[in-house]
């Protein structure tokens, strides 16, 4: 467990502060506890220090390692236009549903980097990964949501082998999303969205070829 760190990537907005801060901190603490890391007691203070002189929107990245060290970096953040539609494709790389590390956000990202490298940026804004059973799991940096017309988005269960995304958690807790297994064929039956806490929901167009 010493070869990776936990990660949280947050958006900071002037006048609003950190978006979904408590959900990020709760996930960080939960992940640390499950993996036997120390308690991340200084995470909130380190985040506040990082934005003390900020004037514009920021992408803030916090890492927390097995020794209890917290590091925070930031960069300017430019949101996507509301009408943005991402082109997404399916990776040949598969996730293993039995890999419990997929359920926490860490710097161990080889499988996601391999999947992302299957397509150049011009051909795919994001890449969706399936598990060994062919079930839809997640994107390389996003959770998956399907609008099937019921009024509630559908998102794959953690047991398929995927991250408990912060935006995903918020939508489920707010009864705007429900958990349900998805196949590739299911994705053709409704409107596809990808999303994460940094960028929110993004409309997506899946290309299967």
Image (cartoon, helix red, strand yellow):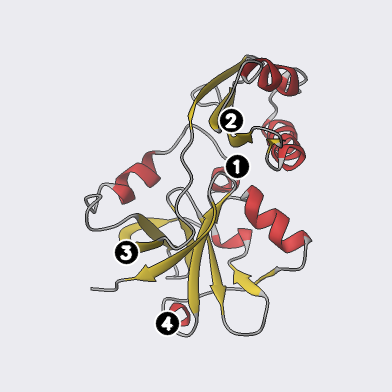
Q: Is residue 15 left or right of residue 206?
A: right
Residue at left offset 65%, top offset 32%: 14
Q: Nearer the viewer, residue 166 or 198?
A: 198
Report, in whole angstroms, how far the alpha carbon at label 4 lies from the one at label 2.
34 Å
Labels 1, 4: front one: 4
Residue 120 drawn at (x, y percent): 21, 50
Residue 172 drawn at (x, y percent): 72, 62
Report, in whole angstroms, how far the alpha carbon at label 1 lies from the one at label 3.
24 Å
Labels 3, 2: front one: 3
- From the image, which quarter does the N terminus lie in? top right
Q: Residues within 10 Å of mark 1 (few under 14, many from 20)?
A: many
Q: Are marks 2 and 1 in contact (CB under 8 Å)?
A: yes
The residue beneath circle 1 is 104
Can residue 162 be seen?
Answer: no
Mark 1 or mark 4, earlier in chain: 1
The residue beneath circle 2 is 6
Residue at left offset 42%, top offset 50%: 140
The residue beneath circle 4 is 188
Report, in whole angstroms, how far the alpha carbon at label 2 lies from the one at label 1.
8 Å
Q: Secondary structure at mark 4?
A: helix
Residue 53 drawn at (x, y percent): 62, 15
Q: Residues within 10 Å of mark 4 (few under 14, many from 20)?
A: some
């Amino acid at each position: 467990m010493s070869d990776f760190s936990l990660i949280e990537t947050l958006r900071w907005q002037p006048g609003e502060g950190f978006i979904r801060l408590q959900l990020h901190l709760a996930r960080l603490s939960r992940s640390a506890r499950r993996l036997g890391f120390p308690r991340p007691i200084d995470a909130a203070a380190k985040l506040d220090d990082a934005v003390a002189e900020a004037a514009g929107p920021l992408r803030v990245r916090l890492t927390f390692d097995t020794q209890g060290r917290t590091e925070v970096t930031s960069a300017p953040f430019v949101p996507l236009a509301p009408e943005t539609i991402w082109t997404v494709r399916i990776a040949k790389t598969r996730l293993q549903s039995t890999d419990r590390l997929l359920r926490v956000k860490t710097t161990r990202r080889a499988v996601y980097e391999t999947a992302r490298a299957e397509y150049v940026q011009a051909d795919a804004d994001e890449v969706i990964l399936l598990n060994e059973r062919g079930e839809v799991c997640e994107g390389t940096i996003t959770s998956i949501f399907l609008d099937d017309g019921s009024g509630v988005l559908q998102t794959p269960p953690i047991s398929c082998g995927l991250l408990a995304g912060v935006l995903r958690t918020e939508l489920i807790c707010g009864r705007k999303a429900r958990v349900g297994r998805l196949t590739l064929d299911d994705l053709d039956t409704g409107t596809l969205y990808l999303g994460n806490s940094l960028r929110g929901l993004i409309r997506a167009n899946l290309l299967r070829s």
